[in-house]
Amino acid sequence: MAEAAAARLITKVVDAQAARGTASVVLTGGRNGNGLLAALAQSPARDAIDWSRIDLWWGDERFLPEGDPERNVTQAREALLDAVPVDPARVHAMAPSDGPYGSDVEAAAAAYAAELAAAAGGEDHAHVPAFDVLMLGVGPDTHVASLFPEHPGTRESVLTVVGVHGSPKPPPTRISLTFPAIRAAREVWLLAAGEDKAGAVALALSAPGEVQAPASGAYGRSRTLWLLDRAAAAKLPPSLYPPASA
């Protein structure tokens, strides 16, 4: 799944750069997101991307000190970014807990929202850029970014970035895009691999509601793509994912 998704992403970025001169991608962390970045780093086609003309954002971040190995940006640098000539000014990391806002996660979230709004350049959709691709890993509980079932962030309809408190998955304090920001993307890709994701995938695709199953509320303006391996798709009805023999 990671290799197939990486190949798709290379094609999408190259097409966006050919059409508009630049590309904008929102990265995701976790097992599946980092697997995709590692696969991209190993791909012989990675150099088809003009790394000086791509903006990289994050869907969420763990509010930990700069360089902490659990931060998504730290893991992304190790998996891919340190190996490609990306413009540092176009790598838009969320603030760490020892950064300019200290331990004030709400201020850090507001600063990221302001950075998104500045990059949007007046585009009329929720004060965020029209991301070419926004990638999200799907958690076993159906969470995406750091929007967890029944948490306040799933009900946010105005703010594009929020501070997350009391996350059921450590660390408890995080920063996350909200649904208004996610849905501004041209394409949203949801990544899930492994049998531990099968129940979440089946639940999210049964349309239970975004508060109960946040992955069901993540969709793009022109396309929503679920990228699964067979284990993650095992509980889907055959009409959605036919068996291998079909």
Image: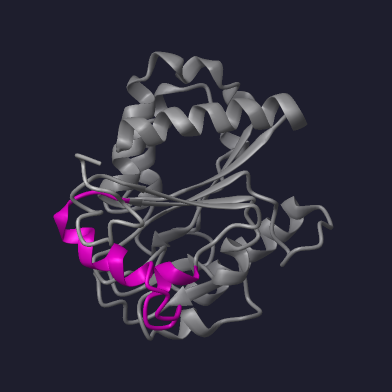
Note whether residue 217 is visible: yes
In-front residue for pair 75/66: 75
Q: Find the residue positioned furthest to the right.
A: 122
Q: Position of residue 3 (x, y in %)?
A: 32, 30
Say which quadrant the N terminus sits in: top left
Q: Where is residue 166 in the image (x, y as percent from the top left)?
A: 32, 82
Which residue is depicted at the point 28% across and 62% down? 237
Compared with residue 117, is residue 67 higher up or lower down, i.e. above or below?
above
Q: In which quarter of the image is residue 174?
A: bottom left
Which residue is depicted at the point 36% across and 73% down? 173
Compared with residue 36, is residue 53 higher up or lower down, i.e. above or below?
above
Whether residue 219 appears in magenta in the rendering, the answer is: no
Compared with residue 5, is residue 105 higher up or lower down, i.e. above or below?
below
Q: Quadrant of residue 181?
A: bottom right
Whether residue 208 appears in magenta in the rendering, the answer is: yes
Which residue is depicted at the point 64% across and 50% down? 186
Say which quadrant the C terminus sits in: top left
Q: Where is residue 82 in the image (x, y as percent from the top left)?
A: 40, 28
In-front residue for pair 144/205: 205
Which residue is depicted at the point 49% across and 34% down? 9
Q: Is 95 displayed left or right of 198 in the figure? A: right
Q: Give the range drawn in magenta.
A: 192-217
Note whether residue 87 is visible: no
Compared with residue 121, is residue 37 higher up or lower down, i.e. above or below?
above
Q: How are the residues colored?
A: one colour
Q: Find the residue positioned furthest to the front.
A: 246
